[in-house]
Amino acid sequence: MKNTTDILKEKATALSQLLMAKPKDMDAINALFEEIGVSTSLTGKSTNKARRNRVGKSDSIGIWKKKTVNGQTVYQRDIEKYAAWHSWANVNQLPEKTYKKRILLLGESVARGYFYAPKYSVAKELEGVLQASNEFNGVEVIDLSKNSLLIDELQELTQSCVQLKPDQIVVFAGNNWVHKLYDEITTDDYKQIEEIYAKEGYQGVKVYTENKLEKIVQHYLKTLVKTSKIYNIPLVIIIPGFNLLDWKSDDVEKILTRLQRNQIQEWIAAKNAADIALANQNDEEFNASAERMVALDPSNPTGFEYLAESYIKQQQFAAARECLDESKDTILFGRGISPKPRCFRIIRDVLIQTATQHNIAYIDLHKLFADTYSDEVAGKELYLDYCHLSEKGIKLAMKHTAKTVIETLTDKEISIENIPDSAVKPTNATAAVAHFCAAIHNAHFSQPKHILAYHCQKAVALYPEIKEIMLQYIDFTSRKASTILCGAFEKVIVGGHMEQYEGGMSLIHPTRKKLIDIELLDTIVDALKSIGHNYTDELQKIRIAEHGITEKPLDILQSFYKLKGYNSYNSTTFRNYVQLRNDTTEFTIVTTGTDNLEVNIVYRIPAYLKDGALKIYINSKAQQLPNLAFSSTWEKAVVEIPKEYLQKGVNKIMIECPVAYDSKQFLETANIQTAMDSFFPVLGEIHAFTIRTQS
Amino acid sequence: MKVNIIGISAFYHDASCCILQEGKLIAAAEEERFTRIKFDPSVPKHALNYCLEAAGITIKDVNCIAFYEDPTKKIARQIWSGLIKNDSTLKETNFNKVEDEIRNVLGFEGDIIYVDHHASHAASAYYFSGFDNAALLTVDGVGEWATTTYGIGKGDHIELFEEVHFPHSIGLLYSTITSYLGFLVNNGEYKVMGLAPYGKPLYVDQVRELIALQEEGQFELNMKYFDFVKGTKMYTDLLPELFGRAPRERESEMEQFHMDVAKSLQVVLEETLIAKANYLYEKTGAENLCMAGGVALNCVANGKILKNTKFKKLFVQPSSNDAGGALGAAALAYVQRTGKRPNNERLPHAYLGPSFSSTEIAQLLGATNINYQNLIGDEKNLMKEIATRLSEGKVIGWFQGRMEFGPRALGARSIIADPRNPEMKDRINAMVKKREGFRPFAPAALHEKAMEHFDIDHESPFMLETCQVISKLFLPAITHVDGSARLQTVTKEANGRFYELLKAFDEITECPILLNTSFNVRGEPIVCTPEDAIKCFVNTDIDCLVLGDFIIDRSQNNFDLLRLFLQNDVNQAKSGIEHDVYTFI
């Protein structure tokens, strides 16, 4: 006869089988749980430790900790937070309040003056303008901005900063607030989103996600307003802008979307038509095709970017800005794995609405820059990347901020023309390094070559001595070795030249994500040519030595060859094979161009693309290899690349995926677990991809 | 077409992957070595890619993946324990994680075979023991339901005929006391083993109160002292009461009391295992014993079992923890597919991981600012150079050939030193290991000379047995307080380079023994790649690093800056599991 324990074990086994079944029979599961009578009291409840300091209880403000020095209460950098020091202003001590008007600047990297800090910063610029205005008998701006500041950290900082007894708080943030939305999205949300999409399309999905984001923003603003009222500290809000013209969506952000009623093929046809029209300078056709793209897929930034280009051609700049603003917001649909910071329209709207409601002064950079540059769409002149401002951008933004600060604190109106320039300015070396850092940052997030060229050219023109740093960069980037171990990297850091890039530590790549920055290095070499130095051969030599294909099979799925930027869904963090979701995906190889190459590839194509094949091209569509025939299971293929298709140095392997699938069939057969799986179908997969010279 | 079988252990701790090709073990590695996340439990995608590359195949060529546990049974046990509740999380929880990740993360399309946890352990020992007939004893914390199993291996097949079920577990008893003594669960167990020789068995009565031996292979824990079923902590308040002392705070001072408790635990563990091994002998009549499971890593107990039972030979697989379960699962899948045992030979060595060519190492060093000596093609001089440094008291980071599979460094990813130096133990602890001073270091010795120095009559290639030091040499750095040592014997066939180094050291010093400890710092996995080795070297005070044919002397370099970079690197090693309590989910 079975004892109670055995019976219980049998029931537990039956229950485990029910739990593993797909779909789960919840009625049967509940019934068995009932029978087993497993008490939740068996399992101790874990207590949630308080994660944050409470208002007024903290004796820290960011990295600074309260201390008494010579009878004065000051805040000194906490050695226990050393690892975070480089993310904040390079200030050891925040002194006790004096007669000076004290302005606190809270914000994200954009408020730090990313790429210039600590040598030049937004806080220094604001202080410079305020001092030059002579409106106060002494004024100081305390820089409490931090790189990558998240909304929860900002909330904490907002509460703790009042200990510094400020006369005014300036908040310059909003770019990083979407992270909290990503953190809070649950599988239930995905299900709701799917239902909304079925009924209302992508517009409905956008409203849903914007509503969630709005709540997050409102929660923070409640704290901000409350803190301001309790301590009677006036506020100024600076709403970040975005580099509408010159920050382009990358391949990940532009992945093809699942559209209803097989419209993806129509969308691709419209895009092809737009490309042809653009090449043929047929503006009317280009505009019509771009409009069609947007109508078919408002979740894909490509259509908006094309349409904006069309409006710019027609000098309809306001319309172009509208399009690019929409394009920027499309990452709300879950595009990209690590998309760059940005201030969404919904955040801007909520900030303006709240500021107006509570009579808080604000500066909307989006509007300010549009008004200032009404005859163009502002871009790289004002921004070094997506949101970080150039020197020109900082000066313009801080002049207007200073005006607002003065008006708030003095209760008098002042004309912008009467706000003086600051005496603060980055040196040529600082500005050059900022541009070089910008070139690197833009490259690491897959920006077009002409933007990289712009920043590299600026850098060498401002400070030709930057050549030495650039050469070191070429060296350590081209190596297979981790950057952190490279001698050339060490030299750059020892020289202190890249302090403006988070102490140089931003040059260190994430694990297994080292990039070889093909376009950037080529651009650097071009820029150096403009000042009389030609390093073309040296670059070629090191690339071939480090990455050249030999008789030993080279794994092309390594980051060097498959990644163009850090924003990638094909990191080994997720899976050990590569998924193709764009119609064309590029891989990079380096060869001497003297040998035929043998490609070994293991691939598959999802069943919903059963009429398709993978097409492979070398360097151009004119050089095609045999197609990889459809196979929904892993298939091996060996393909030869004739040496005639290759050039010495860098070559591109382009894999074109089939896109003609039926949405319904996709939903029936695809393995959908996330938004990425649900909205952005896989078009091909590669498990192994090696190349060697043919013996 | 060859039969290619992948074995996997994952989702618990010590995830690993191995490949059997035509029944031959081609490669095996723990995932933590690649991800640098200590005890990484995640599905071993990097280890799989390595195994495929080592075997020269792709995922398409894999006939099946054998997983080292049965998820259904394991979930049943978790339900029984109350770890899975009927609450709002239930609907969202993916109970098919094992299959889903094998399919979606690894991309495997073929058959998945689930092998019971303890069957995996048993097979991992038997099929690699070279025995044709052996009794099987597996002991660990818990698998699905079983915590201890008894079986027999004959010819191509194994049979497990008795199990002890959760929560009654010798492994969990050991982990509970480990936790009480202020060490991390799933990490500190063998520190407790190392602590035991310093103590007296003053608390055996109390430990015996915790476990009661029963008929046949059975035993029971006295559950009023244990709290691990709830999955939040290991023991109840009654345990400190039983010992009359509060639990030791982590990193606090180690007192005689703690050593006495460790000793008492070790005594009770040994008497329990001996009693159950005797039962197993009576039941099977086999003269050979194969042991596996985390408890089989207790080399002190292993030696006692061999000495105090009628078993004549003992085989413990070098990765007898959960990582090694991958081997057993693959072996059983092979038997299931072909009807044949995978392997008739005793596992000759544990060098089953990645290796790096001199060209690759030269390319890496060429990218750095490191000063080094290149001795490609001059092995004799390389050995002489290193042996000389060792004889001068230098501590060497030794990186050669294929990485070891299993928790022991066996001369491929090792830190080595002169065992005769009385200060060496403290020196290595201070300069690299940063670990508790009481823990002993192990010796590696030339096989043919080992018996002159150690009381042992057989090979010990995997450092899984202890024996008494009988050497005329004074060997303070590797001799434990009770005169024992955890010996590795080295043959030319198993590890030619390490053998040659021992020989060269012997020629200079007349000592054929080296101190051998794992090449890692506390809290990090053993190094895998030349880059890992350089980082570990830079972050410690090891005198010299030997990377294949290259020698890097600290005295010829200034690593201050590089060390600063590494300390600020965001990609630093971390632990992948919970240490406050045994990881039941």
Image (cartoon, coloured by chain):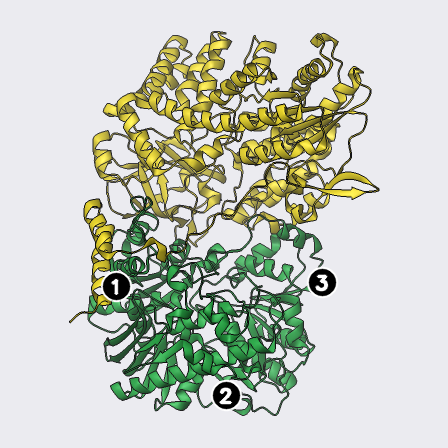
Subunit that carries the residue with mark 2: B
Whole-number angstrom distance, CA of label 2 to CA of label 3: 36 Å
- The numbered disc on residue B556 is 3
Q: Residues within 10 Å of mark 1 (few under 14, many from 20)?
A: some
Q: Nearer the viewer, residue B547 or A258?
A: A258
Residue type at mark 3: give it: Gln
Is the C-beta separation of discs 2 and 3 under 8 Å?
A: no
Whole-number angstrom distance, CA of label 2 to CA of label 1: 38 Å
- Identify the chain drawn in green: B
- The numbered disc on residue B3 is 1
Subunit that carries the residue with mark 1: B
Figure quadrant of residue A197: top left
Whole-number angstrom distance, CA of label 1 to CA of label 3: 50 Å
Colour assignment, chain A: yellow
- Which quarter of the figure is the N terminus of chain A placed in? bottom left
- When the figure is inspected, residue B377 is found, relative to residue B262, above or below; the finding is above
Percent x, y for residue A110?
A: 61, 28
Q: Residue at x 62, y 33 (%)?
A: A159
Q: Residue at x 41, y 41 (%)?
A: A570
Percent x, y for residue A349?
A: 50, 18
Figure quadrant of residue A435: top right
- When the figure is inspected, residue A624 is found, relative to residue A545, above or below; the finding is above
Q: Residue at x 33, y 18 (%)?
A: A270
Percent x, y for residue A446?
A: 50, 32
| Residue that lies at the very extreme toward the right in this rendered image | A70
Evaluate whether residue A656 shows in this view: no
Residues at marks 1 and 3 on the same chain: yes
Is the C-beta separation of discs 2 and 1 under 8 Å?
A: no
Left or right: residue A606 versus residue B229 is left
Q: Which residue is mark 2?
A: B448
Evaluate whether residue A539 shows in this view: yes
